[in-house]
Structures are given as structure tokens and as C-alpha cells.
Image (cartoon, rainbow, N blue to C red):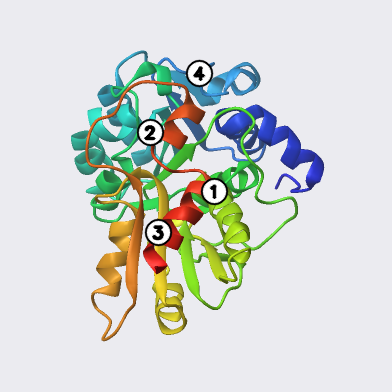
Amino acid sequence: MIAINPINARIWSKLGSRGTFGVAMNELGRTYDKLKLLTADLGVLTGLTRFMETYPDKFLNVGIAEQNMIGVAAGLAHEGHNVFVTTYATFVTMRSFEQVRLNIAYMGLNVKLVGSGSGLVMGMSGNSHYGIEDIALMRAVPGMVVLSPADGAEIVKSVKAAADYNGPVYIRLTGGMNNPIVYTEDYSFEIGKSVTLKEGTDLTIFATGTMVHESLLAAKLLEEHSISASVINMHTIKPLDTEAIEKACRSSKLIVTVEEHGIIGGLGSAVAEYKSTLAQSPKQLFIGLPDHFGKMGEYKFLLEKYGLTGPQISQQILQALT
């Protein structure tokens, strides 16, 4: 296991989500004999240059053929390999959805799907490359685990946890180069168990991916208005940490979900679905991407355009409270 400390946290931040994924895979390549890593012509662009050079017998580039890649991965998994496949999130979840559903999930095979460039980070490539429906798609697949790490340290944790998990997993990588840092020291990571990063008494913010850092900033800004907010990192969308939701509903005046994903079918929907089974629960504020296609643009511009920065999140919460 790679050490989580301030030095590595800074390195992973500079590398971004893709580069950090490459670091994590290098560690797996060193320690997992039955590992196989497949990509659809995106080895360099998904941070795997060193892995390709160091472990050529564990790497396979199938070319721009994402659906075929899923079939090859299923075959390798059926033969006992621990298989990771990676390409852009929109391609591995949308273009290959039927193959993921039938060849992997239906068969219960040990394949880990890694969606690179999820959310809005592929900004200048436009809507064809935005991964804004991937949580909705993957959490609807029976038996699929869905992970959404908050920063570089949690990418390392997620990749290791996925490698040790026997079954299909989807890992969603958000953010680009110079990703904000959430963790600078080791912590307990368990699939299906959220992490409380800040305790509060007035409301609870459930955040995932890049929005964990922005939600922590929002909570700090809310303190200037004498509002105390809990911030919970929901690194696992499925299986959902329902105990954390129940606890928040008992103690909070407002539940807030924040995600770099469409507001339909993502973290907000998952939380709301469970809240609807409770006898009583507070109002919920959904913060995410609106239900329409947007324009292309630089990543930071797009986050601001859709209200996904710390100050904008805090303002939306203030409006909901008043």
C-alpha cells in the first residue's frame, strides 16, 4: 500500500486523477500476479505509460473498440484474472453499457471499470466526452459497486479496495491536473462506508468526487453566517451508506447532496430514494448539473457556470435555508 502523507498528496494533486490512477496501478502491477489492465487506445492519456513499460505482460491495448474491450475483459476474468479496464467515462459506461450489463455484471465477473475524465473535466471536447450520466447508469446495473474518490489519496484507496473486491466495480475519476487535496494522512477506507470530514449541528452535506473539497470550503463559509454544517464524503454511491443518511436525517434541518454529475440518477437521487423510506426526513437540496446539455469550455469556467464551487454551494444552501 502506498503511503498517504503530505508529500504524496501534493504529488498526486499535481498529477491529477489520471496520473494518480497510473501510480496506483503500478503498485498493483508489482504486487498482484494475476492482474490484467486493458485500455481502448488511451494508455498514455490515462496515466499508464510507466505501467505499459514495466508490466507489458499485464497490459493490453485493444484499440478504439470499447465494446470489444469489455468482451476481452470478461474472458480474462473468466479465466481467473483480476481485470481492470479503463477509457473515458462516457465510453466505458455509455458506449459499452450493454456489454457491461451482460458480459460482466450478469456473469458476476471480477472486472473493474475505471472511467477517466468523468464530470466536466473534458471541457473543450464537449458533450460527447462529458461523463455526467455515468453514476446513474452504473448504479442501475445489478451487483455493480460504484466508487467516486474525492482526491488522489482516495483514488489510491479505491483502486486497492477494488482490486481486493471480488466482483464488478466502477471507479469514477473526476478532476484534472492540480486536483484539490482532501486527505494528507492515512484513514480508514471501506466500500459502502462514508467518511465524516466535518461535524455540524444544522445541516448535512453529502458530497462525492471533486465536490468533497468544494463542500468543505462551503461549510467553512457557512460558519461565517453562524451555520454549522456536517460534511460527509460519500466515496461509495453503491452500496449506499444508509446508516449515515439515517443519522443525518435525525439531526439535520436540511440534507444537501453535491456532485459533479447530473441531478437525475446520481448521488442526490440515491440519497433521496433512501430518504423516502424513512418515516420522517428533512428537505433535500440537490446541487449538481442541470437536466440539459451544456456548452464546451474550460473546466474551471464550467464548474463556476453550474454553481459547483465552494462559494456558490454555500450561497445555494443559504437560499434554501431562508
Give the mark nearer the N terminus: 1 vs 2: 2
- For the question of whether residue 6 can be seen, the reply is yes
**Given this view, does label 3 or label 2 mark the residue nearer the observer?**
3
For the residue carrying disc 2, how many other residues have a C-alpha within 10 Å: few (<14), some (14-19), or many (20+)? Answer: some
Residue 149: x and y, percent?
52, 47
For the residue carrying disc 3, how many other residues have a C-alpha within 10 Å: few (<14), some (14-19), or many (20+)? Answer: many
For badge 1, the amino acid type reads Gly
**Given this view, does label 1 or label 2 mark the residue nearer the observer?**
1
Nearest the viewer among 314 and 73 is 314
Spatial separation of the CA atoms under disc 4 and disc 3: 33 Å
**Given this view, does label 4 or label 3 mark the residue nearer the observer?**
3
For the residue carrying disc 4, how many other residues have a C-alpha within 10 Å: few (<14), some (14-19), or many (20+)? Answer: many
Where 281 sits versus 56, above or below?
below
Give the mark nearer the N terminus: 3 vs 1: 3
The residue pinned by badge 4 equals: 43
Q: Are marks 4 and 3 in contact (CB under 8 Å)?
A: no
Using the rendered view, name the quadrant where residue 92 is placed: top left
**Given this view, does label 2 or label 4 mark the residue nearer the observer?**
4
Which numbered tag is attached to residue 76?
2
Give the mark nearer the N terminus: 1 vs 4: 4
The residue pinned by badge 3 equals: 257
Identify the residue at horizontal 42%, vertical 15% (top origin).
41
